[in-house]
Image (cartoon, rainbow, N blue to C red):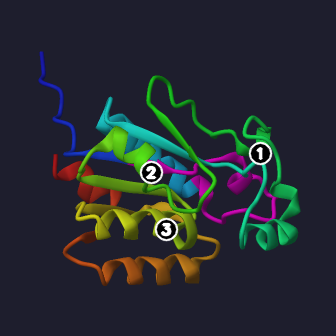
Amino acid sequence: MSTPAPQPEGWLVVVDLQEVFRDGDSPWTTPRFEEARAKVRRLVAAFGDRVVWTRFVAPAEPVGAWKEYYEQYDFALRPPDDPLYQLVEDPGGHPVVDATTFGKWGPDLVEVVGDGPLTVVGVATDCCVLSTVLPAADAGVHVRVVGDACAGSCDEDHDRALRIMGLYAPLVEITTTDEVLAAR
């Protein structure tokens, strides 16, 4: 009998792999969503029970600058159980952290992952992924961003976001799915 491959170190954080970013009719459609999703599936399998999913959800009542944001994106003012906010994958027994902010790094995520390290994947690279990675790195957590398991609002913005996050080395490391899986 063969020994199972060891799991990668730390936690896999799957950022906002939701219908609102997959749906071709959504104003927030993320090109290359399905390409990233295929890589995410491989990583979820490798990380076993150390996976946490996040979901962007609208607040019940926007405050501050979010009021203007939702004036522009009023389609998104839906309850958290709306089909557009559902994850496109079944998280199984993994925890799901909901947030009304782009960035998911905060007390709810910290409660699950502690001080990491983190491997981050998901959508959109240039919004919710970036907004999650930088505060985690700023808190001193080592973060690997799996570039080919992320998708941006467009290819150019995806590449720009990866370059920006790469500037935070050694706190942030940009890697690929194959590299993460080969290192375990």
| Residue 56 visible at all | yes
Q: In screen coordinates, is 73 left or right of 154?
A: right
Q: Magenta region: which residues? A: 13-34
Considering only order in the chain, which callout, 2 or 3, is on the residue closer to the N terminus? 2
- Nearer to us: label 1 or label 3: 3
Q: Is residue 136 above or below residue 116?
A: below
- Nearer to us: label 2 or label 1: 1
Quadrant in the picture for the C terminus: top left
Contact check, label 3 and label 2, Cβ < 8 Å: no
Report, in whole angstroms, how far the alpha carbon at label 2 lies from the one at label 1. Answer: 22 Å
Considering only order in the chain, which callout, 3 or 1, is on the residue closer to the N terminus? 1
Please name the residue shown 19% across and 45% down the image.
9
User: Secondary structure beneath disc 3?
Assistant: helix
- In the rendering, which numbered label is found on residue 131? 3
- Residue, disc 2: 39
- Residue, disc 1: 84
Please name the residue shown 77% across and 45% down the image.
84
